[in-house]
Image (cartoon, rainbow, N blue to C red):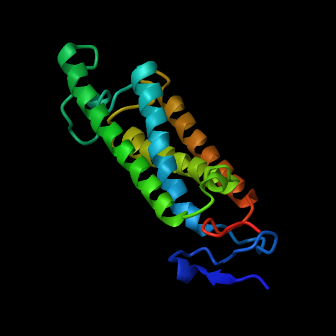
């Protein structure tokens, strides 16, 4: 008979988790990978946003839309040297927060996974939760920064609303796809040695 631990013993709300392969309930997920996966996904999703959209494509910076924001932040035109300097500082703050999220996610993962780390890194469950975390990042950042605060948009200009909506749709797809991928993974206890 498989040893079953309740989620309360793990400090989660996910129900039960089987610790031997093949005996997991269909609705059980390895809850111990959910939190680190989501936190890693938030940090990595932020890095994709910052590196791709802020630096490589240069579509926006953290404060590039403050000429029409909803909170009264001073406008720093990214097309001037002084404006680009201030936007770069805030992009750096954004990257520092993303870096901290990745470090926290790795720390949580490391504290929960004591053996078979290779097995965890190749797990659909972990990568599913990472994708879900990236989706959560897009949804929260998109709603907060693009719509509520309006401090920047994905790509400013006449079609900026469509770019912002596309960013939210991508977030929803990443969240749903990540959740489904995590659910399709085999339930296991990352601290247990495989039989």
Q: Residue at x 48, y 42 (%)?
A: 44
Q: Would residue 121 be found to the left or right of residue 155 on screen?
A: right
Q: Would residue 116 be found to the left or right of residue 1 on screen?
A: left
Question: Farthest residue in the right direction?
Answer: 22
- Camera-side residue of 72 and 97: 97
Q: Would residue 90 be found to the left or right of residue 3 on screen?
A: left
- Camera-side residue of 118 and 132: 118
- Percent across and percent down for residue 77 are 25, 20
- Camera-side residue of 144 and 173: 173
- Percent across and percent down for residue 54 are 40, 26
Q: Is residue 182 visible?
A: yes
Q: Residue at x 73, y 58 (%)?
A: 185
Quarter of the picture holding the N terminus = bottom right
Quarter of the picture holding the C terminus = bottom right
Q: Residue at x 63, y 82 (%)?
A: 5
How many numbered circles does the render carry? 0
- Percent across and percent down for residue 149 are 33, 42
Q: Is residue 157 visible?
A: no
- Percent across and percent down for residue 91 are 31, 32
Q: Residue at x 36, y 32 (%)?
A: 152
């Amino acid at each position: 008979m498989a040893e079953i631990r309740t989620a309360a013993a793990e400090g989660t709300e996910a129900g039960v988790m089987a610790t031997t392969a093949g005996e997991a309930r269909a609705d059980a997920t390895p809850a111990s990978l959910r939190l680190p996966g989501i936190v890693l996904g938030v940090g990595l999703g932020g890095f994709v946003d910052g590196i791709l959209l802020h630096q490589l494509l240069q579509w926006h910076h953290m404060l590039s839309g403050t000429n029409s924001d909803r909170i009264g932040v001073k406008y720093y035109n990214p097309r001037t040297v002084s404006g680009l300097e201030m936007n770069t500082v805030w992009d750096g703050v954004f990257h520092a927060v993303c870096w901290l999220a990745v470090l926290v996610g790795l720390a949580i993962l490391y504290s929960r996974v004591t053996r078979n780390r290779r097995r965890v890194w190749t797990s659909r469950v972990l990568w599913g939760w990472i994708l879900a975390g990236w989706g959560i990042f897009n949804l929260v950042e998109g709603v907060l920064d693009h719509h509520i605060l309006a401090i920047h948009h994905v790509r400013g200009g006449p079609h900026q609303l469509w770019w912002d909506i596309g960013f939210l749709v991508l977030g929803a797809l990443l969240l749903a796809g990540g959740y489904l991928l995590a659910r399709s993974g085999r339930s296991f206890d990352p601290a247990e040695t495989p039989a």
